[in-house]
Image (cartoon, rainbow, N blue to C red):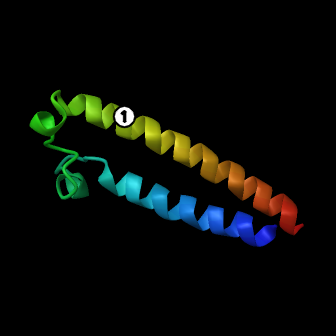
Amino acid sequence: MVAVVVVIHVLLCVLLIALVLMHSGKDAGLSGAFGVGGGASAYGGSSAIVEKNLTRITVIVAVLFFLMTYVLGRMLT
């Protein structure tokens, strides 16, 4: 059971790192490489909508990451 939780925890960690790097900063960062920063024509709307959805997904993954960290900590003690 601990192995399953560790695998999920690692996957959430990698996903959270990728999502944070996809956010556009002052200089558009890595989000331009993945098409998040300038994707107005690709999504049919403004890039603000894409950023808002990316922020929501990042928050959800971060909450799941912290919950899994708590669960893993309780399992190992």
Report the residue that reaches farthest toward the left. Answer: 41
Query: Which quarter of the rendered picture does the N terminus lie within?
Result: bottom right
Instruction: Give the residue at mark 1.
Output: 53
The image quadrant of residue 41 is top left
Residue drawn at point x = 75 percent, y = 72 percent: 3
In percent of width and height, residue 33 lies at: 18, 58
Q: Is residue 25 left or right of residue 57?
A: left
Q: Check the image and name the residue furthest to the bottom.
A: 3
Q: Is residue 17 left or right of residue 23?
A: right
Q: From the image, which quarter does the C terminus lie in?
A: bottom right
In the displayed structure image, the side of residue 24 where residue 7 appears, left or right: right
- In this view, the residue in front, 66 or 8, is 8
Q: Is residue 40 above or below residue 73?
A: above
Horizontally, residue 75 falls left or right of residue 30, namely: right
- Residue 46: give x, y in percent of width and height: 17, 28
Q: Residue at x 25, y 47 (%)?
A: 25
Front one among 77 and 12: 12
Residue at point 64%, 62% (across, down): 8
Q: How many numbered marks appear?
A: 1
Q: Residues within 10 Å of mark 1 (few under 14, many from 20)?
A: few
x%, y% of residue 75? 86, 63
The secondary element bearing badge 1 is classed as helix
Rendered image quadrant of residue 63: top right
Amino acid beneath label 1: Asn
Above or below residue 63? Residue 4 is below
Residue 10 screen position, x and y as percent: 59, 67
* Residue plotted at (72% across, 63% down): 5
